[in-house]
């Protein structure tokens, strides 16, 4: 087998929490008085909370209006909304193909890793009851540099002692695909070609990926 490790992004790949991130940012944008569309939300996917806030404020033409302290309060406000949404999260919100992919990887002794920018990743894995599947969990609390920097993926591979060329990264964001490709990992896009034009492979869900190719 060419591959020894699969590194999974969380939001939008294992679980559809991307919609809750959108709703959280939308509530903040509504309060600040500017529109924020699903299409605009594409650019916020995969990047850190503070980087997403900066982009959102730029989209609303308000990026110069606030102090660092005010921005931190707004990021906390969005996270409060987000935590309200994911409070109800259950196993039924796992995206299709996830359990099949994990079982197939276990049978083939391929390591399973998480590479998420989210600081809420552990909480979400617990809610979904899938924490036990992971050989390595790297999330937003452990990395200094956010995607498109590859740190969140290289840290997984380094800790597991696996060459980057032997890793497959599953991502729904352009920033994440760029990160994977920058270090020679195979980049599988979960989503549409128009949003993920640089993917090595495109799949509707993680269960579709053919490990033997
Ligand atoms: P949090 P992923 C990312 O998770 C989300 O895609 C992105 O929209 C979010 O801003 C980021 O996590 C930070 O999340 O606010 O929970 O720390 O896609 O890398 O799993
Ligand atoms: Mg994602």
Image: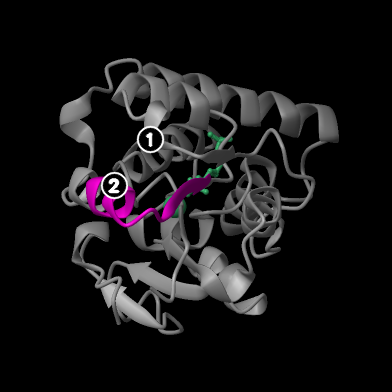
Whether residue 134 is visible here, answered yes or no, is yes
In this picture, residue 32 sits left or right of residue 12: right
Q: Is residue 189 above or below residue 172?
A: below
Q: Is residue 131 above or below residue 33?
A: above
Number of on-image labels = 2
Residue bearing the label numbered 2: 102
Q: Is residue 182 magenta?
A: no
Earlier-in-chain disc, 1 versus 2? 2
Q: Quadrant of residue 124?
A: top left
Q: Quadrant of residue 189?
A: bottom left
Quarter that holds the C terminus: bottom left
Number of residues whose C-alpha sits closer than 10 Å to that of mark 1, classed few (under 14), some (14–19) or many (20 or more)? some
Q: Residue at x 47, y 21 (%)?
A: 123
| Nearest the eye: 40 or 30 | 40
Q: Residue at x 43, y 76 (%)?
A: 2
In this picture, residue 140 sits left or right of residue 31: right
In this picture, residue 35 sits left or right of residue 102: right
Q: Residue at x 53, y 29 (%)?
A: 78
**Residue 191: horizontal and vertical position, in percent?**
29, 67
Give the alpha-carbon distance from disc 1 to disc 2, as whole Å.
7 Å
Task: Tell me the magenta residue range.
Answer: 102-114
Q: Is residue 111 magenta?
A: yes
- Asked if the residues shown at circle 1 and circle 2 are in contact, with their CB atoms under 8 angstroms apart, the answer is yes
Residue bearing the label numbered 1: 133
| Nearest the eye: 57 or 83 | 83
**Residue 188: horizontal and vertical position, in percent?**
39, 71
**Residue 115: horizontal and vertical position, in percent?**
55, 49
**Residue 110: horizontal and vertical position, in percent?**
41, 56
| Nearest the eye: 84 or 180 | 180
SS category of the residue bearing label 2: helix
Whether residue 178 is visible here, answered yes or no, is no
């Amino acid at each position: 087998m060419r591959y020894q490790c699969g590194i999974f992004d969380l939001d939008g790949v294992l679980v559809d929490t991307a919609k809750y991130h959108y709703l959280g940012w939308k509530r903040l944008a509504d309060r600040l008085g500017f529109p924020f569309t699903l299409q605009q939300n594409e650019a916020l996917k995969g990047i850190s909370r503070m980087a997403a806030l900066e982009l959102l404020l730029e989209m609303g033409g308000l990026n110069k209006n606030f102090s660092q302290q005010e921005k931190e309060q707004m990021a906390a406000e969005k996270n409060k909304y987000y935590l309200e949404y994911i409070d109800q999260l259950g196993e039924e919100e796992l995206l299709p193909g996830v359990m099949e992919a994990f079982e197939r990887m276990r049978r083939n002794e391929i390591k399973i890793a998480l590479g998420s920018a989210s600081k809420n990743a552990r909480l979400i894995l617990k809610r979904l009851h899938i924490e036990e599947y992971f050989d390595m969990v790297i999330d937003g609390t452990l990395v200094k540099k956010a995607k498109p920097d590859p740190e969140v993926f290289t840290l997984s591979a380094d800790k597991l002692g696996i060459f980057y060329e032997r890793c497959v990264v599953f991502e729904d964001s352009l920033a994440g695909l760029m990160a994977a490709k920058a270090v020679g990992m195979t980049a599988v896009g979960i989503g549409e070609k128009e949003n993920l034009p640089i993917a090595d492979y495109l799949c509707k869900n993680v269960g579709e990926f053919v490990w033997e190719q």
